[in-house]
Image (cartoon, grey):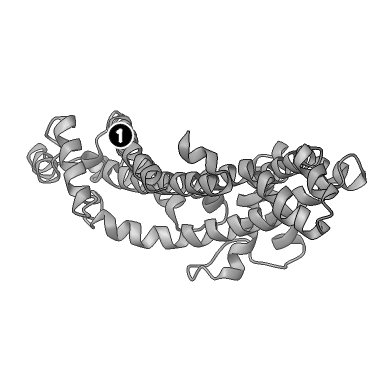
Amino acid sequence: MGRYVARRLLQMIPVFIGTTLLIFLMVYALPGDPVRALFGDKGADPATVANIRHDLGLDQPILVQYWHYLTGLLQGDFGTQIASRRPVTDVLADAFPVTIRLAALAFLIELVFGIGLGVMAGMRAGRLVDSAVLIFTLLMISVPVFVLGFIFKTVFAFQLGWTAPNVSDDVRWGELVMPAVVLAGLSLAYVARLTRTSIAENLRADYMRTAVAKGLPRRRVIGVHLMRNSMIPVVTFLGTDIGALMGGAIITEGLFNIHGVGGTIFESIQRREGTTLVGLVTVLVLVYLATSLIVDLLYAVLDPRIRYA
């Protein structure tokens, strides 16, 4: 198991360097000058602009900038935000806790309701409950996130008055429930369908008939034999979806006026804040890599043959 973990950690290094380099090149290839944008329509003295660019290292070749960025990352330095001159780590510290709370709540909803609906449908494949779950999940997959958000705000905030239409600056847990449901909607539908299909297939497997023929209690047959083998594709999806939830929060945070990673990324793109944008995306890449590693470890636990593949 130790060699398997070490091999996976070594594989993450070139992935991280390649991904961050690609993001770095893409962000700095965007048109416009973030330093000139600081002065708006009034313009600025070319010498002043040149001094700011020199202070921020923007006058150096792109690969040199990337090298300085990587070496800074090793020391925990994500650079400086151009507009406010604040360290990007401070911006990250303000934005990420909010998005982590939203993504965690969305993940919990996705986990409980997605797997719950999938198990119900899979155990009753071909019956009325199965059809109802399939129709519901198809509806969730078909409706875009921003449309679902507007529907929820209109019905639950403006028509019924059960909740505020926007999240306050305090970002209380209760206020995040509606945005979290909207954020989790699409993934919940995929989890339910994956679970349903996996359980329906494994119910017909030989090992299940063997377990029943041996006279094992139904709770053990389902809880140990069926669920353990059926969860492998679901765990894979859930692991990779954690990063997707944090990245996908851009639309949801905009709809509900939440000041997290999504809102900061949107503002950074508008102002061409390359350093801030690369810092935010770099952390998202790290989240993806970490969750991918956890998924691989869970894979190896669920199916030991994978360790030797």
Quadrant in which residue 281 is drawn: top left
Nearer to the camera, 132 or 299: 299
Q: Position of residue 91 (x, y in %)?
A: 32, 57
Nearer to the camera, 201 or 218: 218
Nearer to the camera, 32 or 69: 69
How many marks do you count on the picture? 1
Is 42 displayed left or right of 282 in the figure? left
Q: Residue at x 63, y 63 (%)?
A: 177
Q: Residue at x 68, y 47 (%)?
A: 148
Extreme residue in the front direction: 214
Helix, strand or loop status at disc 1: helix
Q: Residue at x 56, y 50 (%)?
A: 252
Quadrant in which residue 232 is drawn: top right
- Look at label 1 and name its amino acid: Pro
Q: Residues within 10 Å of mark 1 (few under 14, many from 20)?
A: few
Q: Position of residue 163 (x, y in %)?
A: 67, 67
Is 262 displayed left or right of 123 in the figure? left
Q: Position of residue 38 (x, y in %)?
A: 24, 46
Nearer to the camera, 36 or 223: 223
Residue 100, compared with residue 279, is above or below; it is: below
Q: Is residue 79 visible?
A: no
Q: Residue at x 86, y 44 (%)?
A: 130
Extreme residue in the right direction: 128
Is 109 displayed left or right of 262 in the figure? right
Q: Position of residue 216 (x, y in %)?
A: 80, 56
Residue 27, compared with residue 111, is above or below; it is: above
Which residue is the site of mark 1? Answer: 14
Residue 68, compared with residue 26, is above or below; it is: below
Q: Is residue 159 visible?
A: yes
